[in-house]
Image (cartoon, helix red, strand yellow):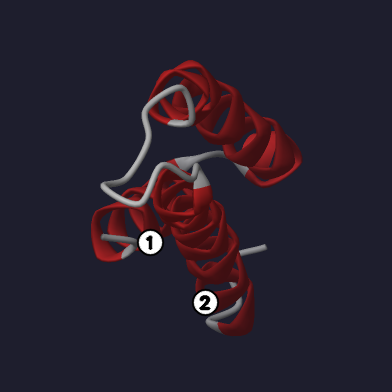
Amino acid sequence: MGIPFFLVSLALVKVAPAERQRQVLLLLFTGAAPLGGLMTMFRDPAGSHLKPILIVCVWAAGIFAGYVAARERGNV
């Protein structure tokens, strides 16, 4: 589930100008935030919010990993 966010983050950071790459990362986080907030309102079959929260955390980890991967390749 984090792979699409990883790939989008990697692609956006690679095509963004050097002075705007951190802004692109922030925009990606804020773009995923409303969807993540919506997902945390749902419950898993056991009645807890743990699964949606873990999904959103995987998204955030994927976004950050894409940024780090682009930085390691010398794009940042």
Q: Residue 33 is drawn in which quadrant?
A: top right
Q: Is residue 6 left or right of residue 66?
A: left
Instruction: Give x and y (percent) for residue 68.
Output: 62, 72
Residue at 61% x, 83% y is: 72
Assess disc 2: are there few (<14), some (14-19) or many (≥20) residues with their C-alpha within 10 Å of its C-alpha. some
- Tell me: residue 55, above or below residue 32: below
Tag of residue 69: 2
Residue at 30 percent of width and 59 percent of height: 7
**Residue placed under numbered mark 1 in the picture:** 6
The answer to whether marks 2 and 1 mark residues whose Cβ atoms lie closer than 8 Å is yes
Q: Nearer the viewer, residue 74 or 53?
A: 53
Q: For the view shown, which residue lies furthest in the bottom direction?
A: 72
How many marks the image carries: the answer is: 2
Q: Label 2 amino acid?
A: Ala
SS at mark 2? helix
Q: What element does badge 1 sit on?
A: helix
Q: Residue at x 49, y 16 (%)?
A: 34
User: Which image quarter: residue 61?
Assistant: bottom right
The residue mark sitting in front, 2 or 1, is 1
